[in-house]
Amino acid sequence: MADKGLREVIAADTKLSDIDGEKGTLSYVGYEIQDLAEHSSYEEVVYLLHHVELPTASELEKVAKVLAGERDLHPFQLQLMKTLAEQTSPMSMLRTSVSASSAFDPDGWDESPDAQARKALRLIAKTASLIATYHRLRTGMKMVTPNPALAHTADFLWMLHGTEPDPEDARVLDIMFILYADHTMNASTFTARIVASTLADMFSAITAAIGTLKGPLHGGANEEAMKSFEEVGKPENAEAYVRDRLERHEKIFGFGHAVYKTYDPRAKILKGLSKDICERAGNPKLHEIAEAIEKAVFEQKALYPNVDFYAAAVFHVLGIPTDLMTPVFAAARMAGWTAHVREQYADNKVIRPGSRYVGPNHQRWVPLEERS
């Protein structure tokens, strides 16, 4: 039986995350996403995904220290970034930069489990720095070096804006990174595991994942959601906006999900964050527009928002430009991608699904001169 989209195909056993689409639940290593968002930090979730257990205080301190120490970019990356900032889009920059990183990684082509663990933490650490440095250079601002005294997400805001972030803003971004850290066998994670299953190196697997995330049907939805907020302009326009798009058979990004049949649990958390941060920033209208679009979509299409919808509003208030929203998604998901790649290496079989042939049969070869 063919299963277009592979919705019902089990491609791997994993200990990393689990979804119940009917109940609308998500867990990492058995911990509900609501608990992690409320109590955990991104560094703690990085450890959880890579060690399949919560860290002790000393283990958490160690992983935070490693991440802080790895956020500095290599001179090669900085030199390359000057060209990329002038010539490429944000996701193209990230894809190219991660691919190029394989050329000077300290572990080289060492594919041992310990080397893979070190490569994973470097990728997690440096992705935030790549995005911030790219934005500073493309806008003509001076680069900001990482501050190892700051937590990972706070340091990203510091490098992006050049000012130490408000602690509440830093915590909001930390929660967002936790929510985006992993999500079972989504398209980009599946891609990473396919590449890893061939025993290609981690940089190849992650580069492929970034390319997959680039599409608007996956990671790009948050950018499109933000554009919809801007197009609607005020809450009272939402109903007509939604109706017009549906009549033209155009997709409304940030709604519906391949797995969840009810409200995405991450979207529930983000809806609350959006309301709080928009009010705190003196921009409650942005959240009201989002709520109005959500109401109109549900009334006309019976679809729930997914993680990307309210994330767009939160990213915007945090000062993250619209075209950087998907790269920031990638920075958070780097924890899950690298954990899945390591899990694939540890118990590997090359992933090779079948296909159903639907073309013509029993054709007869015709010489070129006889073809009309």
Image: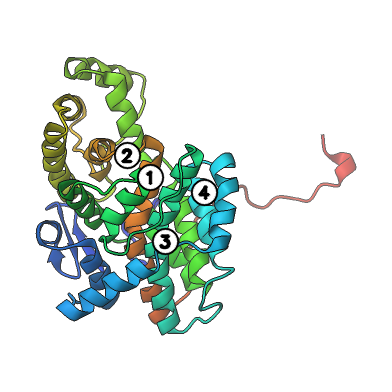
Q: Earlier in the sequence, mark 2 or mark 3?
A: 3
With respect to residue 21, does 107 lie above or below? below
Give the camera-side residue of 65 and 221.
Answer: 65
Badge 2 is on which residue?
222
Residues at marks 2 and 3, CA–CA distance in whole angstroms: 22 Å
The mark closer to the camera, 2 or 3, is 3
Q: Earlier in the sequence, mark 4 or mark 1?
A: 4
- 235 displayed left or right of 162: left
Is residue 147 among the parts visible in the rendering?
Answer: yes
Is residue 56 among the parts visible in the rendering?
Answer: no
Assign a secondary structure to mark 4. Answer: helix
| Picture disc at residue 174 | none
Label 4: how many Cα within 10 Å (few below 14, some 14–19, many 20+): many
The mark closer to the camera, 4 or 1, is 4
Q: Position of residue 348 (x, y in %)?
A: 43, 78
Q: Position of residue 41 (x, y in %)?
A: 19, 62
Label 1: how many Cα within 10 Å (few below 14, some 14–19, many 20+): many
Assign a secondary structure to mark 1. Answer: helix
The mark closer to the camera, 4 or 3, is 3
Residues at marks 4 and 1, CA–CA distance in whole angstroms: 12 Å
Badge 4 is on which residue?
93
Badge 3 is on which residue?
126
Residues at marks 2 and 4, CA–CA distance in whole angstroms: 18 Å
- Give amino acid for label 1: Thr
Residue sitting at x 45%, y 54%: 130
Badge 1 is on which residue?
326
Mark 2 and mark 1 in contact? Answer it, CB < 8 Å.
Answer: yes
- Give amino acid for label 3: Lys
Q: Earlier in the sequence, mark 1 or mark 3?
A: 3
With respect to residue 351, does 117 lie above or below? below
With respect to residue 237, does 121 lie above or below? below
